[in-house]
Amino acid sequence: MSSSRISLLFPCSDIETIFSSIRAMPGQKLSFPARTGILRWMDTFDWQLERHNASLMIHDSRFNSQFILFSPSTTFVSDEPRASTKWVNPGCVKDKALADHLSGLTQRALVPQATTTAAMIKYEFLNSEEMPATTLWLLNLGEIGVCGAILHTKRGHEAFGRRIERRILDVFELQDSTPIATDLFDVVLSMQNRVKKDYQSRFDLTLAPSTESCIAIAKALFGEQQRAVKNSLWIRDHPDPEFLHDLRVAMRRSASLLAVLGPFLAPLDVSWLLTELKKFIGLTSPVRDLENLGKLFRTAALSDSGGTAIGLLRSQISKDVEAAYGQLAQLIPSPRFEHLTASWARLARNALALSLSIPTSGTATGRSSGQVEPMLSPQTRVAVSAPVVLERSAASLLKKTRKARASMSPESLHTLRKQAKTLRYLLEFYESILEPASARQCIAGVKKLQDSLGQHQDSYVQSQLLEKLCSDYGHSRHELQPVFDILKRAQDEAVGDYEREIKHFSGRRMLHAIQCATGSIRK
């Protein structure tokens, strides 16, 4: 049986009377005096705490930060030093019990999802055995005129908790205050014109088989452009790898779609936007690589005691990551980035306008692809273009697979990874018009191959980066050999995963699966 948590919300005009009434209730003791400050509701980029039915509040006062973590099994309260940044890394929380529990819920950075000024008091209610069984957090959110009550009861004391809840309701009823049937967090989000999962991005494109290709491409470009703009604003204020990752995905997906589907947008010129997207992808790569190496140092159980080279380099990498985010914030957002996103949206609008143009006869000419089939024009229906595009991309993947098998060089594996990523993006672009089961099977298979190749590429790049940092900071390879060994094992494991997954791409198996997904052939 888990502990229980009840959230109550009341419109309140006389908060001092409420406080006084609760202090007069029997069986309670004041855990700490009222504290004022900023209340932040924290969660990860993809709302992992909410998925675990957990919630983290941080109340920043003038003196310190108080962390309150609610989870299905327990509640943690910890006073922490005032943080220098708005975001929280679970492993860096000072309280070990809280850090361990928080790390068990997520390894990702937590960022403020909603913020408001608040005065907060904590009460503990003692049962007949003089043991604290129920805790009440009473919050006065003055700027929005409500009072919130969060009641947490330990497991096995539910009946006691219900009695305390009834008493709390009686206190508010005496003030003619009726509970608002919503969550405190939701109210604050609503006041800030936001809803939950505002920043959880997922590529979701619904097409009809008769949709014209230019319209489908326009919809995809619009969605990814908005995703990029949204994340670029958060990167400036919240140096979270998840926002950077989502921005990179938006740019990479758009670049891949333009590179392959550019001929469908003739006579529009996509070359400048494609070049600029690749430029910004390249600018974000060093930050990502440095941060991934820093994550390895944090999570690989490496000792940082005694001023060892590992500990020193771990600290230096943390500083380098912070500096790299500062430099990135000068580029994203920036006038050049704003010009990119404006051109991105303009191309999407122009692609949409192509649906109104008169279909041209003859062969359409792409940006750099040479001639394409006469049927592949802006007005080509996606049901017609899907088999051609997907089978062509799958054939290219099979060709690069054979080359990678022959050499097994980092360069050939990286090229294969990029082609796998392109095929996956195309499958997701057409997914809504494909045979569902076959499409999911294809996407899952390509993603597994892509993940194994990604692990290999990441560990290879991190090894090279570590060599450079050793040189820059005057460390010998011998001093950091444990880290190099971890990276070498990661590469070996990735090769094993790759050799297992690549079997699904031998011969015509993947091509056959894609033909089944597009309906070109029957299973």
Image: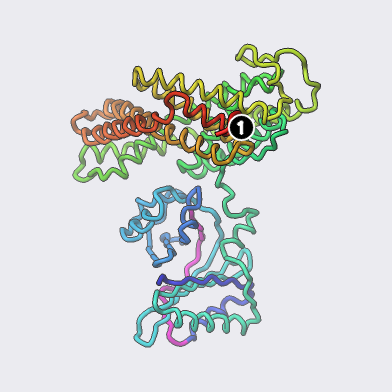
Front-most of residues 270 and 429: 429
Q: Give how far across and how far down residue 136 sits, in percent.
A: 47, 74
Residue plotted at (43% across, 82% down)? 28
Front-most of residues 479 and 31: 479
Q: Give how far across and how far down residue 38 sits, in percent.
A: 51, 60
Write down the quadrant of residue 140 in the picture: bottom right
**With 173 as the anchor, is 98 left or right in this view?**
left
Give the quarter of the figure containing the C terminus.
Answer: top right
* Magenta-highlighted residues: 26-43
Residue 365 magenta-drawn?
A: no
Tag 1 secondary structure: loop
Give the residue number, with chain letter if any, for mark 1: 519
Q: Give how far across and how far down residue 468 sits, in percent.
A: 31, 26
Q: What type of secondary structure mainly makes up the magenta span? A: strand
Write down the quadrant of residue 481 in the picture: top left
Q: Is residue 229 above or below residue 164?
A: above
Residue 38 magenta-drawn?
A: yes
Type of residue at label 1? Gly
Taking the image as drawn, is residue 303 in sight?
yes
Residue plotted at (39% across, 24% down)? 413
Please tell me how crowded label 1 is: few (under 14), some (14-19), or many (20+) other residues with Cα within 10 Å: some
**With 390 as the anchor, is 481 left or right in this view?**
left
**Residue at the limit of the structure toward the front, as seen here:** 522
Q: Is residue 161 above or below residue 256?
A: below
**With 2 as the anchor, is 268 left or right in this view?**
right
Residue plotted at (37% across, 35% down)? 320
Q: Give how far across and how far down residue 364 sits, in percent.
A: 70, 15
